Image (spheres, grey):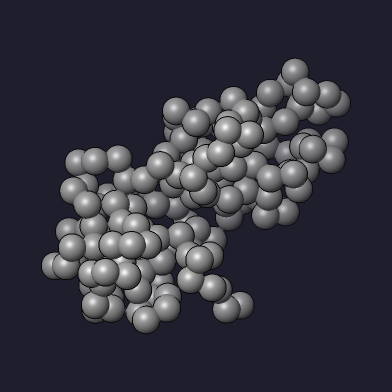
């Protein structure tokens, strides 16, 4: 499936702007990723495919880059978090907690105050947006994106 540039999740410590302005398409960051989740997108620029796994924020991609693509890895990697969409099986009354079982930050939890079977809530302060929950969701109801107020449900 071909993805538009706006659909790309960029590596941590980078932005669409920094990639457009500084990336030369050398692929060093892609080759350096020990998780193997980076791929060459438009013009050989790096993007993440969370279906391949999670980002551990190891910094290998940033360290491999000689250009001004990545910010200092001492800063927060990004302001993105997991967002649970309306297609979540919990919203349909079907119990599923694969994402909560997989989250390394325990940022996803089952909120039983919502009936009949609860809903998955995201603790925005704990979530790092690593993407570990994305490939385990059987219906693809989770995305990693910049949070909006209505997405902060936990």
Left or right side of 34 for 121 = right
Q: Quadrant of residue 35?
A: bottom left
Residue 34 visible at all? no
Whether residue 86 is situated above or below residue 1 in the rendered picture: above
Whether residue 117 is situated above or below residue 128 in the rendered picture: above
For the N terminus, the quadrant is bottom right
Count of numbered labels shown in the rendering:
0
Left or right side of 33 for 124 = right
| 27 or 58: nearer the viewer | 27
Residue 15 screen position, x and y as percent: 34, 57
Residue 117 visible at all? yes
Look at 30% across and 40% down and name the residue there: 76
Q: Residue furthest left?
A: 66
Look at 61% across and 36% down and name the residue there: 151
For the C terminus, the quadrant is top right
| 49 or 151: nearer the viewer | 151
Q: Residue furthest bottom?
A: 43
Look at 37% across and 62% down and name the residue there: 16
Residue 80 screen position, x and y as percent: 45, 44
Q: Quadrant of residue 149?
A: top right
Q: Quadrant of residue 69?
A: bottom left
Residue 96 screen position, x and y as percent: 73, 39
């Amino acid at each position: 499936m071909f993805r538009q540039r706006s659909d790309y999740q960029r590596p941590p410590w980078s932005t669409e702007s920094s990639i457009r302005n500084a990336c030369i398409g050398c692929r060093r960051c892609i080759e350096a990723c020990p998780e193997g989740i980076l791929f060459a997108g438009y013009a050989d620029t790096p993007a993440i495919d969370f279906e391949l796994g999670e980002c551990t924020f190891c910094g290998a991609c940033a360290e491999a880059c000689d250009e001004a693509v990545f910010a200092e890895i001492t800063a927060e990697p990004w302001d993105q978090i997991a967002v649970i969409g309306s297609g979540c099986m919990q919203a349909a009354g079907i119990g599923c907690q694969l994402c909560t079982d997989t989250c390394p930050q325990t940022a996803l939890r089952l909120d039983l105050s919502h009936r009949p079977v609860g809903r998955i809530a995201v603790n925005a302060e704990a979530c790092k947006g690593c993407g570990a929950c994305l490939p385990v969701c059987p219906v693809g109801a989770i995305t990693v994106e910049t949070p909006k107020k209505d997405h902060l449900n936990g």
